[in-house]
Amino acid sequence: MQGNNGLAEFMDSNLQRILTAYYDVPEGDNRIFVFYDRGNYTRLTELYMNDGMAKQRLVEEYDTNISTVDKEFFRSVLAQVKAEAPADSYGLILSSHGGGWVPSDLYDVYLLGEGTRSDEPQAQPLFYAQDDYDCMEIEDLAYAIGDTHYNYIIFDACFMGNVEALYDLRHSADYIVASVAEVLGEGFPYETMVPMLFEYEGHSLEAVCEEYMEYYKGSSGTVALVDCAALEPLAEAMRGVVGAAATLKADATAVQAYDAFDYHLYFDLLHYAETIAASDEVLKNFNTALERAVLYKGYTDTILTSTGDEDSFAVERSCGLSCYIPQDACPATHTAWLETNWAKAIGAQ
């Protein structure tokens, strides 16, 4: 939990919800560690029961001047948890701000409206998480995770359900749960979700997604469960779509978007593929690969947003994964996108 970025109030609440959920975690060798950078403190704790009360045991207190999005520091914390609790399997929940594949400085241009698209800054790497004004890049996150292969990674962060970012993390976990759009500050329903994550008869991640959608059904939410092993075949299928397409620059106004920026950053992957596909055959092949990759998808009809003048936008369809669509008005964004491993894998130009 990285909350030194305006999210501390929400994370305080979520931590209490995790403590409440701990009462319902099945008995056995199940352990929960919480890393929390609140700004005024940075701690690693372990949950435990004492006299019928869920409490936190302090494992380590860190210097608050340390940037918790530094890849070496992040890697050392994950290694520390493994040393404290050797296990047969691990799960990882990452909670912070998020922007997926989009370079952090470039995202700020879209968010703050500074300059024009033709004056976009030169792109830096992609980002997940924020500590004050520092951001963690996707490639740094993959490095920090290292050779630990997680059963699942859950992103309690906005916009992390884009195929470009998840493709970079395809070797880090069996499954990833993420949202293509903004995640409200309350985040995931931890009090009901946490016990589900310790069920041993198969993974319960689909149930986690269903619980998420039930929690936000009268509000705003979208979530998907992705099989990481299917992302490579999905890239191959998309390469077939791209190779046969007349152009990659589809009419962006006609494709479902998941943000309200003047120039969108996140579009529905399937809708985009349908727009540029040159034949039913390549589209059918892509659909097959997509169905194998996205095991669950859910969304509300309306998504609340802080990315535009309006406070919400409609979602008419969602395949569970987003992507970027090249746009002539956004040359620097296009250049940054072409540097992603996904764009290279699908043969984009």
Image (cartoon, helix red, strand yellow):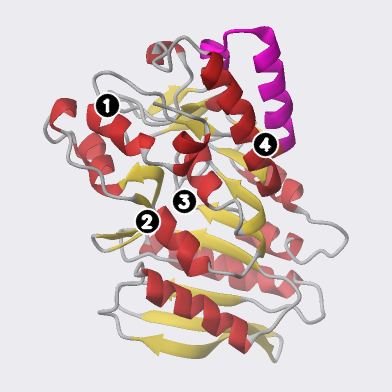
**Label 4: which residue?**
233
Quadrant for residue 297, please give it: top right
Q: Position of residue 95 (x, y in %)?
A: 48, 59
Q: Earlier in the sequence, mark 1 or mark 4?
A: 4
Give the crowd class for mark 3: few <14, some 14-19, many >=20 residues within 10 Å: many
Disc nearest the viewer among 3 and 4: 4
Q: Position of residue 283 (x, y in %)?
A: 65, 16
249 relative to 124, above or below? above
| Dot 3 and dot 4 residues touching (CB under 8 Å) | no
Q: Earlier in the sequence, mark 3 or mark 1?
A: 3
Disc nearest the viewer among 3 and 1: 3
Whether residue 88 appears in magenta in the rendering, the answer is: no
Q: Residue at x 70, y 30 (%)?
A: 289
Q: Earlier in the sequence, mark 3 or mark 4?
A: 3
Q: Which label number is shown at residue 157?
A: 3
Whether residue 291 appears in magenta in the rendering, the answer is: yes
- Callout 1 amino acid: Asp
Q: Residue at x 61, y 49 (%)?
A: 177
**Label 1: which residue?**
309
The region drawn magenta spans 273-292
Q: Residue at x 52, y 31 (%)?
A: 346
25 relative to 321, above or below? below
